Amino acid sequence: MHPTRRRTSALLAVSAAVAGLVTPVGVYAANRAGSGAAAPLAPTPEPAGSECRTSVEGSRVIAYCHNPYPSIDLVQLHTECTRWWDVDADGKAVAVEPGRTVRLDDRCWKEVASAWVSHRPGS
């Protein structure tokens, strides 16, 4: 056998092998598209988290958090004070049971720059 014939037969064998591998993918894709079946939708996450109202009066911060959902929510009050020498605070995380309301409070020595409540799933 001549070297060109060997190369040609090797090339034909490789081409046949590649075609054999690609054909099932094309047939699968054509069957999926022609079947009319839609791709399964990702599950929708269950609503969770408390609704919090935060108010600042002078140097005091008060937040009320109500959890209307069936899962426990851990809430934490964060207070940032205006003065550089006044200590910023992160309160203790409090579990809000389903259907319950909790009160979170904190204070600065002088003015409050900002306050917010963070949430994370409870156990």
Image (tube, grey):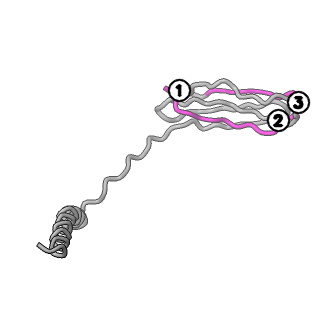
Q: Earlier in the sequence, mark 3 or mark 1?
A: 3
Residue drawn at x 64%, y 37% as measured from the top left? 52
Please check the rendered image and state whether residue 99 is part of the magenta-colored stretch, yes or no.
no
- Residue stretch rendered in magenta on the structure: 102-123
Q: Residue furthest front?
A: 2
Report how far apart the C-alphas of labels 3 and 2 lie in the structure.
Answer: 12 Å
Q: Which mark is residue 85?
A: 3
Q: Amino acid at mark 1?
A: Glu
Q: Is residue 116 visible?
A: yes
Q: Secondary structure at mark 3?
A: loop
Identify the residue position indicated by label 2 in the image. Answer: 112
- How far apart are the two marked residues, 3 and 1, measured between alpha carbons? 36 Å
Q: Residues within 10 Å of mark 2 (few under 14, many from 20)?
A: many
* In-image side of 77 versus 83 (left or right): left
Give the mark nearer the N terminus: 3 vs 2. 3
> Foreground residue, 15 or 114?
15
At 20% across and 61% down in the image, what residue appears? 21
